[in-house]
Structures are given as structure tokens and as C-alpha cells.
Image (cartoon, rainbow, N blue to C red):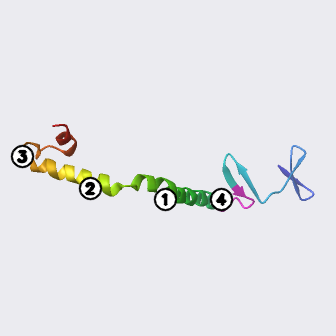
């Protein structure tokens, strides 16, 4: 690469000067800083976090008071039966 009249050239082609460029999914600015790239990734992560909290999490937590209390009750009741007391929870459900 060489400079010709203040322009960057490569094999006799004048290269455009840009503020930032995205190559192979990585954004680099004219100062070789990755700040814009990092800000894009943080913004995308925040977006996915909001989606998880508003769409996925409610489905996972729906009626958890019912199935969580059922599981707790099952664990407690298997400990009351003498022959199941020393078994772990999954094994006690199979006996």
C-alpha cells in the first residue's frame, strides 16, 4: 500500500477511506479500535436478555408454585417411608 496525493492506493487502485469497516463479523474503525464492535455485541446481548425475561422465563415459571410444591411434597413424603429414607430422590420415586 502506498500513498499517492494523500490517498491510499493498492496495486494502482485508490482505496476509499471509511470511518469503520466490518470484516469477518468484526467491526474496526479507522483508529483500529474495536469500541463500536464491542458496543454492538453488548447491545445484542442486552436485547437477548430482555427477550429471555419477557418471553422464555414466564413460560418456565408458569404455575411453578404447583409443580414446585408437588416436588417438595414428594421429597418429604419419600423420607417418611422408612425403606425409602436412605435412597436419593430419583431412586425413591422408582420404588
- Residue 28: percent from the left, percent from the top? 70, 56
Which residue, given by chain and number where applicable, does mark 3 sit on? 82
- Residue 61: percent from the left, percent from the top? 40, 55
SS for dot 1:
helix
Label 4 vs 1, first from the N-terminus: 4
Q: Are marks 3 and 4 in contact (CB under 8 Å)?
A: no
Spatial CA distance of label 3 from label 4 is 63 Å
The quadrant in which the C terminus is found is top left
Question: Which range is magenta?
Answer: 28-37
Tag shown at residue 34: 4
Q: Is residue 21 above or below residue 92?
A: below
Tag shown at residue 64: none
Which residue, given by chain and number where applicable, does mark 1 sit on? 53
Q: Is residue 81 above or below residue 5?
A: above
Identify the residue at image location x=41%, y=52%.
60
Label 3 vs 4, first from the N-terminus: 4
Residue situated in front as seen by the camera: 1 or 93: 93
Left/right placement of residue 89 relative to residue 25 reads left
Identify the residue at image location x=66%, y=51%.
26
Q: Residue furthest right?
A: 5
Which residue, given by chain and number where applicable, does mark 2 sit on? 69
2 or 1: mark nearer the eye? 2
Left/right placement of residue 95 relative to residue 26 reads left
Spatial CA distance of label 3 from label 1 is 43 Å
Mark 4 neighbour class, 10 Å CA radius: few under 14, some 14 to 19, many 20 or more? some
Label 3 vs 1, first from the N-terminus: 1
3 or 2: mark nearer the eye? 2
Spatial CA distance of label 2 from label 1 is 23 Å
4 or 1: mark nearer the eye? 1
Label 3 vs 2, first from the N-terminus: 2
Identify the residue at image location x=31%, y=52%.
67
SS for dot 3:
helix
Amino acid at each position: 500500500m502506498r500513498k499517492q496525493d494523500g490517498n491510499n492506493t493498492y496495486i494502482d487502485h485508490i482505496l476509499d477511506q471509511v470511518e469503520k469497516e466490518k470484516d469477518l463479523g468484526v467491526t474496526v474503525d479507522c483508529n483500529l479500535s474495536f469500541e463500536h464492535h464491542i458496543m454492538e455485541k453488548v447491545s445484542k446481548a442486552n436485547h437477548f436478555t430482555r427477550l429471555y425475561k419477557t418471553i422464555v422465563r414466564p413460560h418456565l415459571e408458569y404455575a411453578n408454585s404447583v409443580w414446585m410444591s408437588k416436588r417438595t411434597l414428594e421429597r418429604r413424603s419419600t423420607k417418611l417411608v422408612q425403606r425409602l429414607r436412605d435412597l436419593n430422590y430419583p431412586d425413591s420415586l422408582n420404588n
